[in-house]
Image (spheres, rainbow, N blue to C red):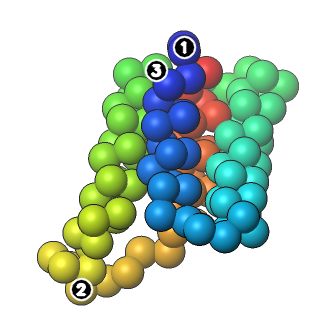
Amino acid sequence: VTGYDHLLFLVGVIFFLYRLRDVVLYVSLFTLGHSLTLLIGVLADVSVNAYVIDAIIGLSVVYKGFENINGFERLFHVKPNTRIAVLVFGLFHGLGL
């Protein structure tokens, strides 16, 4: 309800970015995903289980923290696509309001 979870996720996304262009790109991807599901939720009257969405939003913060410490590369030897992850988690964050 307060939006702190959204801000925490975005801080995790932009924490290691040093070019303004990258910051704008990632914040825009999050905003696009968030706005799409927020709009669909209002106009199409889509409702989802708030507990599931809140859990996914919490996991998005954990995911981003794990990605920031290179956990996926160290443990699984894969580098996730951060752009897609930010967009997808933006979609879930939009459902959380």
Can residue 48 be seen?
no
Q: Quadrant of residue 63?
A: bottom left
- Of discs 2 and 3, which sits in the foreground? 2
Question: Dot 1: what SS?
Answer: loop
First of labels 2, 1 by sequence position? 1
Question: Dot 3: what SS?
Answer: helix
Residue 1, numbered label: 1
First of labels 2, 3 by sequence position? 3
CA separation in Å, label 1 and label 3:
11 Å
Disc 3 crowd, CA 10 A, few/some/many (<14, 14-19, 20+): few
Find the residue positioned furthest to the left. 75
Q: Pointer 2 and pointer 3: residues touching (CB < 8 Å)?
A: no
Find the residue positioned furthest to the bottom. 77
Q: Give the x, y percent position of residue 81.
A: 50, 74
Disc 2 crowd, CA 10 A, few/some/many (<14, 14-19, 20+): few
Q: Residue at x 54, y 34 (%)?
A: 6
Question: Dot 2: what SS?
Answer: loop
- Mark 3 is on which residue type? Ala
Find the residue positioned furthest to the front. 18
As displayed, is residue 9 above or below residue 14? above
- Residue at numbered disc 2: 77
Question: Which quarter of the image is occupied by the C terminus?
Answer: top right
